Image (cartoon, coloured by chain):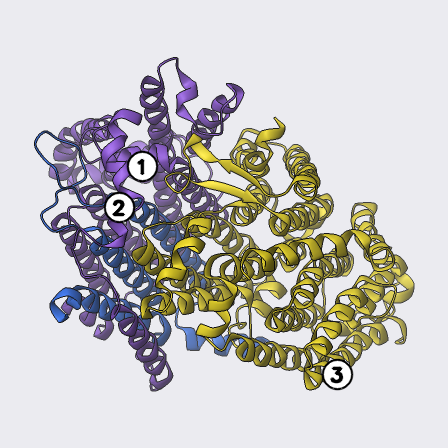
Amino acid sequence: MLAHLPILQVIVPLMAAPLCLFLTRSRLVWLFALIASGAAFLISVLLLQQVMASGTIIYELGGWDAPWGIEYRIDQLNALLLLIISAVSTVVLFAAHTSIKEEIPADRHRLFYILYLLSLAGMLGIVATADAFNVFVFLEISSLSAYALIALGKDRRALWASYQYLIMGTIGATFILIGIGLMYQMTGTLNMYDLSQRLPEVDNSRTVFVAFTFVIVGVCLKLALFPLHLWLPNAYAYAPSIVTAFFAATATKVAVYLLIRFTFSIFGLSFSFTALPLQMLFVVLGLLGIFVASFAAIYQTNAKHLFAYSSIAQIGYMIVGFSVSTTTGLMATLLHLFNHALMKSALFLALAAVVYRIGSVQMNQFHGLGRQMPLTMAAIVIGGLSLIGVPLTVGFVSKWYLVLATIENGWWPVTVLILLGSLLAIVYVWRIVEAAYFKPAIVGRENIKEAPMSFLVPIWTLVIANIYFGIDTRLSVQVAQSAAQSLFGVNP
Amino acid sequence: MILGLYNYWIVVVLMMVGFYIVIAHGNLIKKIVGLTIFQTSVFIFYISMAKVDGGTAPILAEGITQYSNPLPHVLILTAIVVGIATTALGLALAVRIKEAYGSIEEEEIQTKDNLDC
Amino acid sequence: MAVAFAIVRMKDLFAVIMLSGIYGLLSASFFVAMDAVDVAFTEASVGAGISTLLMLVAITMTGRTENPSRHKPLLALAVVFVTGSLLIYGTLDMPYFGLATDPVHQHVAPRYINDSMQEVGVPNIVTSVLASYRGFDTFGEVVVIFTAGMGVLALLSVVRKPKDMAEIDLINKSMHEEHLILRIVAKIMIPFILLFALYVQFHGDFGPGGGFQAGVIFAAAIILYSMLFGMSTARKVINQSYIQLFAAIGVLLYGSVGVISLLNGKNFLDYNALSADPVAGQHLGILLVELGVGFTVTSVMVIIFFNFAGRRNDQQNKENNDL
């Protein structure tokens, strides 16, 4: 079985989804989904161990060798992402049963778990594959289930947010399809490794340039890079809280993965950064994303909107790290991928707990919660500190490497701007802290209790992980460094 | 050169018409129609790529030596199915939005949302 | 192209949808001209058939006309112009249309054309690539359809009280006179449509056809039946929860073929592992896998239609009760 781990990673959640239709009791379906997700997590841990020890794993589907068949290639980069996605999924699922009781009608619960597992399998499939068209197919699996999950939100704005996401997401996916078609037309192959061998022969042609542009734009739509981020705030704010907790930590990370994979492994480093002025473009757009989004976050009245804009800002940081295009820069991006997943899933899970207890995430409803829900609020505070980049939290580690990368490159203005961005984060995190701790409790709400264990366990697991990886950085840094070095090594 | 490429240019025009409908029109159903046209035009592009002059459909038969390329056909079969899946979900959303907002015009929905906030 | 421009200008959505159906049919004929017969078949049934049907059902609920837009679409035109120019710029270096020496025909395709008969043993090369060489993509595609079905269920399903037989008889009698001719013709045609669907399913190895096309045709027969005989009758014939299970079974069947390959020691979806003789294994694998596709496509198409129609019935009932 060990040899088949790469495909089991995707197949287990993928086949668990239709199996859910055979179960009727909502609690059973939840347990079944949790087990499936947990199994996916275990597999990802084993895969990461195997890759760190012996290098890239190749798996041929259907027994046909590539490029005539589809193959899976697991290297350090995907193994890291597989781990992040399956870990977040399992932890979030733990709280799902309780959370959706209040937010989704009972007759939809089973469908929720099915769509959740399909989304998980879709994302795992995007990351694991080495075939460009296979990416498109699994991208659509994860996107379609995402549109449906977001639309399950209580507020009618969830429907509108989902529709907008559907339109923008499908345009992005169609752009990627056009790009893949153009690449295929010039090289005759769809396999990523094969493409990287054949594209250099034709890469001064205009067709390949256009292919690259379309792929990049399509991926940036999914990434929510400024100014293509318009779908994200509403989608995160109005989806069921548990859905936001899952997607905030995974969906955009997968898009960042695709960006890295297409530029480094397929088109090649030298082409990608000379064909388009990508460095300049991404640094500017990344910084704009950080500032525009952080400013927007400060003025929000809805806590979910606040953290959604914060996510757009964090993606800006990742893109800046990518634009530095050195090993340290890429390391910073990968570290921030990992850290942001930990931070945001904890934050949105805590918000889910708040919704469960008081039914709202308007900031003016947070008054007094510091005393009434101490553990939940403490988690939000630590998450906020991590967003700012305070030492001892995981957010500090990625900011550190990001600053290091920009200094190494001699980009002093960028360094200053990154630090300024952190100051803005202090402002919007303070707004929550102030509302929860420094305002008198709302009258008539004395009997709000702390969140139930089904929330506290996953939230604090993530928070403790946040602090642990902030102090003992060996594991995450080692993996990120290994991944970055191998990506640079493949295409000098 | 034009003769060799005119096929692709027509496809580009079709794609852009579909794309324009999606972004410029406010009616939700019309947007979905535009999306379908956009996607179908991309399919036409892929299939044009596959044609070989003097070839036939890629079904092995006696006496035929020249076949058109089967790989894009396979890809487009998948893409058509993906397209209908997206259309179905989009239409379902439009129906729900009409029930919830009473309208499927983008401007009217935005106005109602702004009033809510 | 004229069709596309007309769609831009028209405000009556019913006409727009009909035009998009025509666009689909025109594309299908184009595909035939380009030797893409399987694709043409699928585009005609799916793109021109089901797509048009669903859109029509949708506008019965959302309204038939489009409001004229008040603002000038300058930004949209600019974006479209830039994108279009970029694409045309990209075509300037493209290999010319139709040449056998194009890169697309060089590297991967020749093996499919030359070796698939020995390796897979099926004359329709598109089927052998779809179901065997790139079988995992097709598995993903089945899952996409399944996801759409689940999504539509999540969005549109309505909890329904079962109507008793007396009520249904009443509805049937009232419809009987109105649609007598249609009903009689349908009763004659539906068995043939179902038979044709079965033919397409199993003949996909030798001619154009296969699981998707067959599934859609099968679903079309069921939809025809429910349109003419009423949704309540149709629901008695086709039980809602069973059809959902049927959709799941299709996906699981496809996946299980892959798992059996795993258990026999080979990679996922390696059909050579299914039988002592590899080519026989390929045949068996393709047969089972296409069957799985057919099951899921039929069920999901029926689920989607029933839920759209059911939602409409629900809306109408609510309106009738309010009056």
User: As shown in the figure, which amino acid type bears the numbered disc 3?
Assistant: Leu
Residue ID at (28%, 65%) = C64
Chain shown in yellow: A
Please tell me whether mark 3 sits on a helix, a strand or a loop.
helix
Residue A76: x and y, percent? 64, 49
Residue ID at (9%, 47%) = B54
Instruction: Estimate how packed mark 1 is, as few (under 14), some (14 to 19) or many (20 or more) residues with alpha carbons within 10 Å.
Output: many
Q: Which residue is mark 3?
A: A420
Residue B62: x and y, percent? 10, 29
Work out how far the residue at label 1 is from the one at label 2, CA to CA, in angstroms: 10 Å
Q: Nearer the viewer, residue B102 or C292?
A: C292
Work out how far the residue at label 2 is from the one at label 3, CA to CA, in angstroms: 52 Å
- Please tell me if label 3 and label 1 are on a single chain: no
Q: Chain of mark 2?
A: B
Residue ID at (32%, 33%) = C233
Task: Please tell me in which quadrant of the rendered image residue B7 appears.
Answer: bottom left
- Residue at the extreme top: C276
Is residue A153 among what the camera can see? no
Q: Which residue is mark 2?
A: B73
Q: Which residue is mark 1?
A: C129
For chain B, what colour was chosen? blue
Q: Is residue A298 left or right of residue B61?
A: right
Instruction: Estimate how packed mark 3 is, as few (under 14), some (14 to 19) or many (20 or more) residues with alpha carbons within 10 Å.
Output: few
Q: Compared with residue C79, is residue A400 higher up or lower down, i.e. above or below?
A: above
Q: Compared with residue A2, is residue A344 higher up or lower down, i.e. above or below?
A: below
Disc 1 + disc 2, Cβ < 8 Å: yes
Please tell me whether mark 1 sits on a helix, a strand or a loop.
helix
